[in-house]
Image (tube, rainbow, N blue to C red):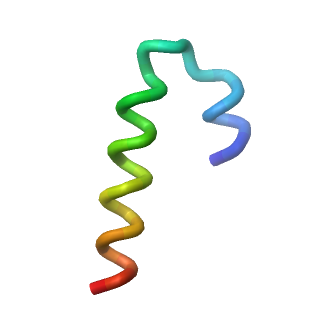
Amino acid sequence: MKVVLIKSPKFLAPILRAVFKIEKVKSET
């Protein structure tokens, strides 16, 4: 995950944030 964040272009940042949020919500439920 960390490597993907470092290698990903700037326009992917919001997408990765959204995915991270979704995963966090899934783990909480």
**Quadrant in which residue 6 is drawn:** top right
In this view, 28 is above or below 23? below
**Quadrant location, the C terminus:** bottom left
2 sits to left or right of 28: right
Q: Foreground residue, 4 or 17?
A: 17
Residue 14, position in %: x, y? Answer: 39, 29
Residue in the picture at 38% in, 63% down: 23
**Quadrant in which residue 15 is drawn:** top left
11 sits to left or right of 18: right
Residue 1, position in %: x, y? Answer: 63, 47
Total numbered badges shown on the rendered structure: 0
In this view, 21 is above or below 10? below
Residue in the picture at 62% in, 33% down: 5
Residue in the picture at 39% in, 79% down: 27
Residue 18, position in %: x, y? Answer: 33, 44
